[in-house]
Amino acid sequence: MNGLRDTFWELPLADLNRAEWEALCDGCGRCCLHKIEDPDTGQVEHTNVACKLLDTRTAQCSDYRNRKAFVPDCMRLTIKIVGEVPWLPESCAYRLRHEGKPLRDWHYLISGNRESVMHAGVSVAGRVVSELVAGPLEHHIVEWETP
Ligand code: SF4
């Protein structure tokens, strides 16, 4: 892959170039789902409601390059905030590397197969509903497992 060093995913996050940072994502799609945060306690409930740009069959953003134009509050995960986002799944590649842990064996960079994330039950593909048709978020609270 262009601009990617061998086993770059074993390097500290701070040493990754832009292409490597982007390639680190396992594509699970969980950060593209709505959450409900209790304003008093800060507790976060997860839902199965996806951002309107998420392709619910593949769990991929349908317009990643221009997403900010359509969804201005789309969070851009950066090295500065990766440790401060409490709702990232335990298996999120950025969270794992921030914590100094190795990627899971189903990560495509380890398995060599982009579909491993689905077979491992981590991807939200086919398990979510678009915000365009979902209705109230409170009707869609779920607990996502992290194998
Ligand atoms: S939760 Fe992490 S690994 Fe999964 S899609 Fe979001 S940034 Fe990528």
Image (cartoon, rainbow, N blue to C red):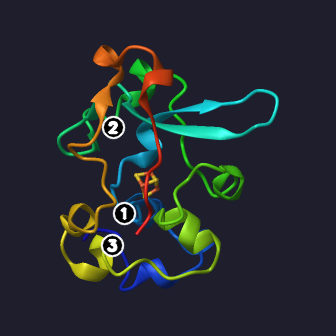
Distance, label 2 to label 3, CA atoms, is 20 Å
**Point 41% across, 57% down: residue:** 22
Horizontal side of 12 relative to 8 (left or right) equals right
The amino acid sitting under disc 2 is Tyr
Horizontal side of 40 relative to 16 (left or right) equals right
Q: Is residue 144 above or below residue 142?
A: below
The amino acid sitting under disc 1 is Ala
Residue 34 coordinates in the image, percent (x, y)? 48, 32
The answer to which image quadrant residue 27 occupies is bottom left
**Point 23% across, 61% down: residue:** 118
Residue 63 coordinates in the image, percent (x, y)? 28, 32
* 1 or 3: tag closer to the N-terminus: 1
Q: Which residue is label 1 attached to? A: 23
Q: In the picture, which quadrant includes the N terminus?
A: bottom left
Q: Which mark is residue 107?
A: 3
- Ligand 1 resides in the quarter of the picture at bottom left
Q: Secondary structure at mark 1?
A: helix
**Point 35% across, 54% down: residue:** 28
Residue 50 coordinates in the image, percent (x, y)? 36, 32
The amino acid sitting under disc 3 is His
The answer to which image quadrant residue 140 occupies is top left
Q: Which residue is label 2 attached to? A: 64
